[in-house]
Image: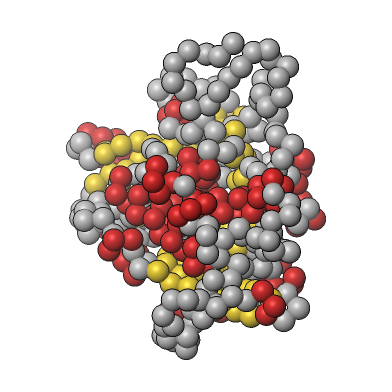
Amino acid sequence: MKFPGKRKNKHYFPVTEKGRESADPHYVQDEPFYLVGIDQLLVDIECGVEPEFLERHGLKKGESRILPDEAAERIYGELKAAGRVRGEFAGGSVGNTLHNYSILSDERSVALGAIKRNIELGDYAFKYIRNTSSKVDLAWLQPSDNPMGRAMCFVTPDGERTFGISKGCMNDFRPDSVPAEVVEKASALLISAYLLREESDPIFAATIRACEIALKARVPVVMTLGTSSLIASKRDFFRDFISRHVAVIAMNDQEALALTGEKDPLLAADKALELADLVLLTVGEHGLYLAGWVDEDFARQTTYELHSKSIAEYNKFEFSRPMRRSDCASPVRIYTHINPFMGGPGLIRNTNGAGDGALAALLHDMGARKYHRTKVPNSPKNLENSLTYSSLSQIAKYANRVSYEVLAQNSPRLTRGLPEREASLEEAYWDA
């Protein structure tokens, strides 16, 4: 029996038919095509403010600061009374990326973190769940007696974003709440630098444990750097942590400067390869860079025009699929750069989530590698030990297009996938 009406997915009886999903909320499919992410669960509160507002409340423009819960409530009340609150949405860098990954791939992702134990209609926790894709599995969240965390995003007239964070329960996630069997089967483990801000917080130890589980199972750890001031304040710690645990890092130019000391984005990406295997670096109106490693035997030369900047002919091998440096007998550095899709949207109210969107595209491609190796095991595209399914060049095109969509819709979370003619990734992005 088929359900009536036009539906994207087909559902049949009897219930014993193969292909149906289990009703068990802790069910994870045997085929490892899902993404796992640890996050400080937050509700984003977007507000329009003037620069003097930031100065009055001791907020540094473009940076992120932890606010006491009382101060956050006072600022929120002031903005609400002035009609400055533009919207309240599910947030968090990792949460945004998990949501966008599931929208793009139509596959499950798993969120790990702490959430308010008693959720009421209309409260912040309710808003988080309401605005998160149903494909994001929340079954492993740890309940907490503390309130939901909040991230106030103050947008000045020039579009710059400044954050004030009210912690709530966002750091309550404990090491014993990390489900090892879920992490071990994932296509990647996604974390952020924010999780490692305070070593005394439970979520710090939980993140370390999850990374150790992922490393043992050869699951790539992907880390987004969050904010330049945090990286600068603990630069040596993060450099050591990345070199020990992280395969892929995602950052913007300011975070790259704090991590590597290089202002030039291409040189910063190059230096970051001393710490990680694959680097995604977004540079706002100047597009994005990708840098990685490939074994000399698998290096593929581009058919596009060669470009030289701070590195001569840097895109020579951009048609290569990146690998872990440790898996390369003769490692070669590879790079690519792409300018914003169609020059970027005509109107950008703020840049919130553009980098998360680009990272979601990269993670989708990493998941596609596992999917393709399982479904088509004899395909010539199944390079041994490659990190991604596509070439560096094609990933850049895909990430760039998703960033454009995030900016155009003025929301860090995609409300839809790419247009149908572009969503056929096998044709549009994965042929190179």
Is residue 382 depicted above or below 325 in this figure?
above
Q: Residue at x 34, y 54 (%)?
A: 404
Q: Percent from the top left, x then y, of residue 259?
A: 53, 72
- 20 or 326: which is nearer to us? 20
Q: Quadrant of residue 73?
A: top left
Residue 284 drawn at (x, y percent): 35, 65
Q: Is residue 34 shown to the viewer in this render?
A: yes
Quarter of the figure with residue 238: bottom right
Image position of 50 (left or right of 252): left
Residue at (35% x, 36% y) in the render: 88
In the picture, measured across the screen, residue 176 lies left or right of residue 339, that is right
**Which is nearer the eye, 233 or 319?**
319
- Residue 77 in the figure: left or right of residue 208: left
Give the residue drawn at x 73%, y 51%. 377
Q: Is residue 228 in sight in this rendering?
A: no
Against 416, residue 205 (above or below) is below
Task: Check the image and tell me how it is coloured.
Answer: secondary structure
Quick check: 120 left or right of 49? right
Q: In the image shown, does 362 or 85 lie closer to the viewer?
A: 362
The x and y percentages for residue 172 are: 61, 40
Give the percent coordinates (x, y) of residue 131: 43, 32
Furthest residue in direction right, as rendered: 216
Q: Which quarter of the rendered picture does the N terminus lie within?
A: top right
